[in-house]
Structures are given as structure tokens and as C-alpha cells.
Image: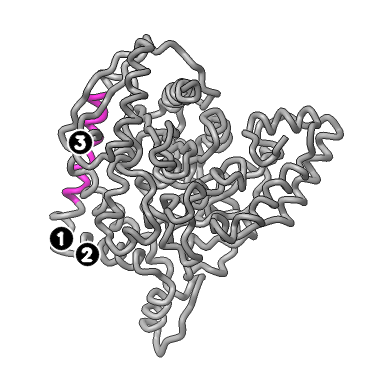
Amino acid sequence: MTLNQLTILSAHQGLKNKEFSASELAKAYLNSIKKQNKTINAFITVTEDEALDQTKKIDKKISQKQFGQNLLEGIPLGIKDNILVKDVRCTAGSKILSNYRATYDATVIKKLKEAGTIFLGKTNLDEFAMGASSETSAFGPVKNPHDLSRVPGGSSGGSAAAVAADMCLAALGSDTGGSVRQPAAFCGVVGLKPTYGRVSRYGLIAMASSLDQIGVLAKNVDDAAVLLASVEGHDDKDSTSRDFEFPTELPKTTDWRNLKIGLPKEFFAHGLDPQIKNKIDVVIKKIATGGAKIIEVNFSNLDYALASYYILMPAEASANLARYDGVKYGLSAPGKNLLEIYLNSRTQGFGDEVRRRIILGTFVLSAGYYEAYYLKAQKVRQLIHQDFQKIFKQVDCLLTPTTPTPAFKLGEKVNDPLAMYLSDIYTVPINLAGLPAVSLPIGQAEALPVGCQIIGNHWQENKILSVAKMIEEMVGRG
């Protein structure tokens, strides 16, 4: 048995049956990190001592027959390095926070600690989650385990690469415009972005507060459901956190004949790689053969989604990042006066992409431009939300590609921001509408993973996970 290739459910069963100990399981992943991290660069910080200390407590519970209360008990996870874990360094992939240690646990971390989860370390990411390739990190780019010359996607590229390379059983990421689903597609794993407000953002370093959502990356759909079920729920410390009536369950495979699957015409237009389209078409044909009703749908305002997103997101980011001034915490560069301290700290602490988005966001919020850009983008966002609501009256869920292309080469788009932003074209609309979506692998194109995205209405995670599970089993059967 290769311990670092198990799923959450199989690892839980193995621990329960005493086939191996929690310490042995964690060491298998820690050894994998030691062997591969210098090459892949998926982890910024590895918390080996803390992880092994925690496994001793789990092994004691196993020996005393007190184990098994939670499916995540003793399960080794990676945590994106913009989610706070008390007393552990949290950098957000930025030089300005390179020595910052969290003073409290994020709500999701508190829940996972209560579940008995083992934290292996903090995973690499685009600086402040700003990027689609995990190349903007101050700690160096992450590489795709399937092809080290290519990107793993971003900004949760470290988490996706770590799961794909068997460096952790599953991982947490954050998704502002596709930052869980796009790297999941590039790395051939499952990535789930929940409904906005389903998972508390307390303790997540903010980029764009109305778009950010903590998500999960896992080896299969079942594991994604298990991890989401452990971190979801209302939180008084997050004013955007919501109560809901549909707690996440393990996916249940049902009959395709009961489902109406929507295919948005705009997602299959010019720009989609032919090989990805072929893979999606195969899935669609199998679904139709199974009895599902395939319905082509149209969006009235989807063409404006990317433009709207890249006005709203930088605007919110510019406000959120104002706190990094070289005075309160983080990097502080000397200056002759307070203004120079601000300027020097931010110039030395922030990378090019972060500075670009701060400048853009400040511009669209400035006097004379607020109504022309920011306010108009908010109106477009509402129209996109209304489009989705009309369409969900016709279908149960939507099926789309996750990305327009497979993983691209390192350095290929890093100097072309517009080309980089287009990598998010199929994921951004979901964040604007606050909807849940899951990406799952459906095969390969020239040895690179291809992802398929299932989009649901608000709070319909159980439905999209069940559909994803059926596709997963269907693809697995060939």
C-alpha cells in the first residue's frame, strides 16, 4: 500500500482498521514533500514538527478506541498561504508579509483542528492571490507536476500541485475568479468553489471581499465533499456568512434521465482549444446517451463578465491592501518621513502584479471615474446574476469547460496581463454571481489534464457534486 496515494475516505478506513498509524501516514506525505518540493515549489512553509506532534494525539486515540468521530481525523492537508493558522508564518506569497506569523486561527482552521486534521504546511500562491499561474509569488513560481515546464494555474497553484503530486491528501485554497477551479483543471484534480457565504472568510487574507471564497482541492469528488462539509457553516465573525438548509453530503449517483443539463453557447465559442472541446463533447454525448436532457442556453450579458470582474476586483483589492503600509505589521522600509515609509515599504514589498492592480483599482474608484467604471461594473454584475437565475429555471445545472486551454508554459503569459486574465474567462462569471461550481478532470490533451466545470444555483452543492460524481465514474469507465 502506497500511503501517499490514498483518498481521504480510504485513509480514514485504513486508520480505523489500524492498517497504519497517523504518524506513518503523515510521514509518507512529509517525505514526498522533501523529495519533490525543491522541484515543484508547492509549499512555502512545512510544519513537520507540529504535524508529527498532532499525529501522536491521534495515534493515542486510535489505541484507546476513541478514533473515528470525524472523517478528517488524522488526515494530512495543505493550507493555502493566505489562510491564517495561529503561530505559523502566513505570507500570502508576498515579500511584505514574509516574516508575518498569524496571531489567530481562521474559522476554517479552527473547525479542522476540532476535527483532528493534520496540517503539513502552507502552500504557495500568486502574491495576494493575484494571478492565474502561480508565477507572481515572491517565493518563486510553482510548477505543474504533469509537466515541469508548465504552470499549475493560479492563484491556488501550490494547493493544486501538492494534491496532484501526492504531497498532501487534499488542500484548502481560495477562489476569487477561478483560483481553485482553474488550477484544479490544469493539475488534474477536483476543485470546488462553494456558494459565496457558505464558508466563513474570517482569517482569509482579503483580496476582493465580495468575490473571495475559500474552496477545496481533492483527488476525487467524494473527498471534496468531505472537506467542504467540515469547513462550511455560519460564522458570527463573518458578516457575509449565511445560514443555509442544505449541509453537504457525500455525492449520490442518480439517474441521468432525471436531469436537465444546460450548455451555455458562449462557453463553447471562439477561443476554446479544439482538444478541450473534443473531450467535453465526449462527456456530453455520454450524458445524453444516459438519458439526460441537454439544453443549449444563452446569456445576454456574459461578454461583459471579464471586463466587469477586472474593474471590481482591483477596486476592492486596492482598498483591502491599503492596510499594508509599513507601520502596523509586515515589511517596514526606512524613510525620512511617514510618507516615504509608506512609499518605500509598498514599493519594496509588493510585486509588479499587485502594484498594477492597486493602481487600476485606485483609478476606477477615483473622483470622476467611479460612476463611469465601478458603478457600471456593479450594474453589469447584477445583470449577469439575473441571467443565471433565468437559466436555472430551465436547467438543473450547467456544464462547461473550466479553462479555454490546457496548462501553458512558464513565462508564456507573465508579461502579457490581458492574455493571463483571459485564462479566467470561464470561471469569473460564477464568482460575480456568487454561485457554486466544481471542476473535475475528464482526460488529457497531449499528456496535459483537461477539466470540466459543473455550475449550480445558490446552495446547490449537493446537486453539482452528484453530477460531478456521475461524470467521474463515467470517465473512469472510459
Kind of residue indicated by mark 2: Phe
> What x and y, as percent, mark residue 367?
17, 64
Of the 4 image quadrants, the one containing the N terminus is top right
As drawn, is 2 to the left or to the right of 302? right
Classed neighbour count for the residue bearing mark 3: other residues with Cα under 10 Å, few (<14), some (14–19), many (≥20): few
On screen, residue 53 above or below 297: below
In percent of the image, x 46 and y 61: which residue is there? Answer: 141
Q: Nearer the viewer, residue 251 or 205?
A: 251
Q: How far across and how far down the image is residue 226, in percent?
A: 57, 31
Q: Which mark is residue 363?
A: 2
- Give the residue furthest to the front: 446
Which residue is situated farthest in the right direction here? 64
Q: Which of pointers 3 and 1 indicates the residue nearer the eye? A: 3
**Residue stretch rendered in magenta on the structure:** 375-391
Q: What percent of the width, then of the height, locates residue 49?
A: 74, 57
**Foreground residue among 265 and 94:** 265
Q: Could you tell me which secondary element the residue under label 3 belongs to? A: loop
User: Which residue is at 29% across, 53% downward?
Assistant: 421
CB atoms at circles 3 and 1 under 8 Å apart? no
Q: Which mark is residue 269?
A: 3
Q: Is residue 175 part of the magenta span, yes or no?
A: no
Left or right: residue 244 versus residue 297 is right
Q: Which residue is mark 1?
A: 369
